Image: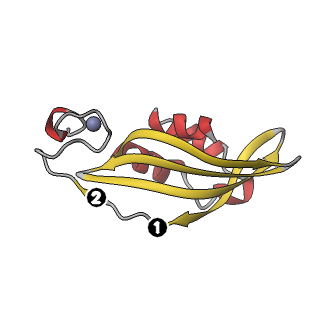
Amino acid sequence: MRSRYVAYALKNAKYIYQTYAQEKQAENPVKEIADFANSCRFIKLAVINTEQQQSNAEVEFCVSYFYQSLFCQLHERSSFIKEDGQWRYLDGEIFPVADIKVSRNDECPCGSGKKYKKCHNV
Ligand SMILES: [Zn+2]
């Protein structure tokens, strides 16, 4: 799961695609993954809870990122399955979190204490 987050942050769409469960790969083409990853500036990953069994696992996490001038959080409980010895993402349940519109002079929501325009605004 962490490796998938890192791959999103590094915009490594191929890795994200390959770590989808086989049955999910067709509906998640590499290009769509790349478009999403390229449109976001990722800030942090917080793992809230994990439960792991032999061939399936659940991970609850919260990812913070900017999309345009919105500060977004994805809070999700994901299911992973083990295929070919590798953990792969099957699906997830999303807990809705409202996006926050950030203005240039606001304090940056990343927690740096700087103004947004001097921090994560691009
Ligand atoms: Zn910032």
Q: Amino acid at mark 1?
A: Pro
| Label 2 with label 1: CB-CB less than 8 Å | no
Query: Which picture quadrant has residue 23?
Result: bottom right
* Residue 32 position within the rendered picture, expressed as x and y whole percent measured from the top left: 47, 53
Up the image or down, 38 lies above or below 71; here it is above
Q: Position of residue 40 (x, y in %)?
A: 36, 45
The total of numbered circles placed on residues is: 2
The numbered mark at residue 100 is 2
Give me the C-alpha separation between circle 2 and circle 1.
13 Å
Q: Quadrant of ligand 1?
A: top left
Q: Give me the residue at 42% from left, 63% from top.
A: 97
| Direction from residue 49 to residue 65 in the image, left or right | left
Q: Is residue 47 left or right of residue 113?
A: right
- In the figure, residue 41 lies in which quadrant? top left
Tag shown at residue 96: 1
Give the structural element (helix, strand or loop) at label 1: loop
- Secondary structure beneath dot 2 equals strand
Residue 78 image offset from top left, x and y in percent = 65, 56
57 and 84: which is toward the camera = 57
Q: Nearer the viewer, residue 122 or 23?
A: 122
Please name the residue shown 64% across and 42% down the image: 1
Coloring basis for residues: secondary structure
Classify mark 2: residues with Cα within 10 Å, few (<14), some (14-19) or many (20+). Answer: few
